[in-house]
């Protein structure tokens, strides 16, 4: 699985690909210059249960750590991921 990031001035997205096909999408909006809000996560039905959503959240965490940013998880899926995985809460 590969996760690509498209970052724009006010928002961006992480797109997951499985064998070259889009498997998931997670969108975010910037909240100032040092925080971003994960506002939506979707996984194509054919890829449910394959960890696609989790990979996108972990890619967002990696991006936040690399750039000294904080994440506000408003999307219910992302929020649940942060509640379940203590090791990624340093970016909250």
Image (cartoon, rainbow, N blue to C red):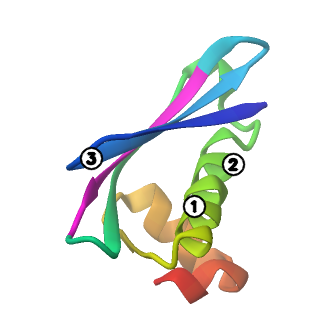
Tag 2–tag 3 contact (CB < 8 Å): no
Task: Give the residue pinned by disc 3.
Answer: 11
Callout 1: SS: helix
Q: How many C-alpha atoms fall within 10 Å of the one at disc 2: few (<14), some, or many (≥20)?
A: some
In the image, which residues are magenta?
23-31
Eye-nearest disc, 1 or 2:
1
**Which callout, 1 or 3, points at the residue further toward the start of the chain?**
3
Taking the image as drawn, is residue 15 in sight?
yes
Name the foreground residue: 36 vs 86: 36
Instruction: Tell me: 41 left or right of 52.
Output: left
Tag 1–tag 2 contact (CB < 8 Å): no
Q: Which numbered tag is attached to residue 63?
A: 1
Q: Does the magenta stretch include residue 38?
A: no
Callout 2: SS: helix
Residue 49 versus residue 64 in the image, above or below: above
Q: Which residue is drawn at 73% across and 44% down?
A: 51
- The secondary structure that most of the magenta stretch takes on is strand
Residue 72 versus residue 43 in the image, above or below: below
Eye-nearest disc, 2 or 3:
3
Q: Which numbered tag is attached to residue 2?
A: none
Q: Residue at x 52, y 81 (%)?
A: 91
Taking the image as drawn, is residue 42 in sight?
no
Q: How many C-alpha atoms fall within 10 Å of the one at disc 1: few (<14), some, or many (≥20)?
A: some
Instruction: Tell me: 49 left or right of 43.
Output: right
**Which callout, 1 or 2, points at the residue further toward the start of the chain?**
2
Percent position of residue 41, x then y: 43, 44
């Amino acid at each position: 699985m590969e996760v690509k990031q498209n970052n724009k001035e006010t928002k961006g997205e992480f797109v997951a690909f499985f064998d070259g096909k889009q498997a998931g999408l997670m969108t975010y909006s910037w909240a100032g210059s040092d925080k971003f809000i994960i506002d939506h996560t979707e996984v194509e039905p054919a890829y449910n249960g394959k960890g696609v959503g989790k990979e996108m959240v972990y890619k967002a965490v990696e991006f936040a750590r690399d750039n000294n940013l904080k994440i506000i998880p408003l999307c219910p899926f992302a929020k649940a991921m942060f509640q379940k995985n203590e090791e990624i809460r340093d970016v909250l």
